[in-house]
Image: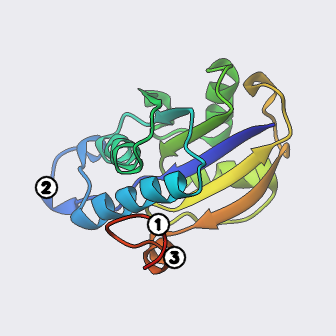
Amino acid sequence: MKTLFVLRHGESDWGGGGADFDRPLAPRGRHAADLVGRYLATLDQVPDLVISSGAVRALTTARRAAEAGQWDCRIQTCDRFYESSATDVLQVLREGETRADRVLLAGHEPTWSQLVQLLTGAVVRLPTAALARIDLTVDSWDQVAVARGTLIWYVTPRMLERVMSPGDGDGSG
């Protein structure tokens, strides 16, 4: 079985102008990315590989989560995730890493919600920095297909704020 984490980028900063692809994270988005990283580490569900959209806000979300959670995994970018479809993302998964058991994808809406629905049948909307865990009934990533997954859980930054202590990530606060 493979585990897929689907992470929408954190809230971006609309004040800087410039191209959409280059928008940075807002302070709230940076905080949310840190929460996600600590949350996965606390659950001992750190990804083996992170594949992120090359857009600044998505890649920064992935990097901050990895740093905050002290994940020891490779982060690679995939510019195909920017303005892609859920079927495009499935194709990237099929063509990519074969050794990783847990992969986290960092990217954008509406593609990420569509991906969750395509894989699991669950209709969800992923607000900024929301994270979904999907268990896939496949032995290798090249077998990933429609309706081969189960949505195990879904969390938002607001939910994590309630269970994660800002300093230690042990969930006691």
Q: Earlier in the sequence, mark 3 or mark 1?
A: 3
| Residue at which label 2 appears | 16
Mark toward the viewer: 2 or 3: 3
Q: Earlier in the sequence, mark 2 or mark 3?
A: 2
Work out whether 91 lies above or below 18. above
Mark 2 vs mark 3, CA separation in Å: 28 Å
Q: Is residue 70 visible?
A: yes
| Residue at which label 3 appears | 159
Mark toward the viewer: 2 or 1: 1
Tell me which amino acid carries mark 2. Answer: Gly
Tell me which amino acid carries mark 3. Answer: Met
Q: Residue at x 81, y 57 (%)?
A: 121
Q: What's the mark number on residue 23?
A: none
Q: What's the mark number on residue 170?
A: 1
Rate crowding at label 2 as few (under 14), some (14 to 19) or many (20 or more) other CA atoms within 10 Å: few
Residue most extreme to the left: 16
